[in-house]
Amino acid sequence: MIGPKKYRKQLFDLGIEGMEINVSTIDNAMSTLNEINEIEKFLKKIRYNVRTDIRRIRLDYMAKLQEVDKSANKKSGLFGRKKSVSKIVQEKKMLTKERNLTIAAYDVVENTIDDYLDQIESSRYYIKNSIQRRVG
């Protein structure tokens, strides 16, 4: 897993925020179209990696929750007592909250990627219309 900070840095390094669409000539428009196509491919790769990381996080936390369930039946401590139900519930809630917070950071990255992909789609439409107006 890379982590949401590294993904945000990758997105920042793409330079999408300050990108200008130049359609002054057909060559510039085609060049810009090729550039946004490359950016789109990279964004889709990042989104795939983000989703893979989210799946891994969910699996890890599912395993941790199962460990809590297994530890509930084991006797531990000085007097050999089982864990109380409230302690087990508390541990599960804590793990669930931790999981949700971790996934939320990845969700922010995924939503940013989706926004960028929407912008790319509308930019592609604008560029294609610009080229069509010039050609015919």
Image (cartoon, rainbow, N blue to C red):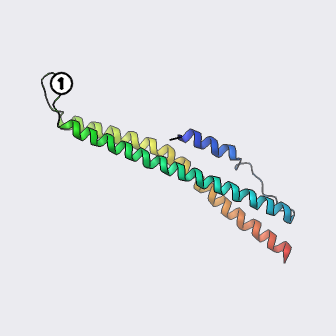
70 lies left or right of 94: left
- Look at label 1 and name its amino acid: Gly
Of the 4 image quadrants, the one containing the C terminus is bottom right
Q: Residue furthest top?
A: 78
Q: Residues within 10 Å of mark 1 (few under 14, many from 20)?
A: few
Closest to the observer, 103 or 62: 62
Q: Secondary structure at mark 1?
A: loop
Closest to the observer, 54 or 121: 54
Image coordinates for residue 100, horizontal then vertical, percent: 41, 44
Q: How many marks?
A: 1
23 lies left or right of 120: right
Image coordinates for residue 113, horizontal then vertical, percent: 59, 53
Q: State the residue at coordinates (85%, 74%).
A: 135
Image coordinates for residue 19, horizontal then vertical, percent: 75, 51
Q: State the residue at coordinates (74%, 66%).
A: 126
Image coordinates for residue 11, horizontal then vertical, percent: 64, 46
Q: Indicate the quadrant where residue 80 lies.
A: top left
Q: Residue furthest bottom?
A: 136
Q: State the residue at coordinates (71%, 62%).
A: 123
Q: State the residue at coordinates (58%, 43%).
A: 7
Q: Quickly name the residue at label 1.
A: 77
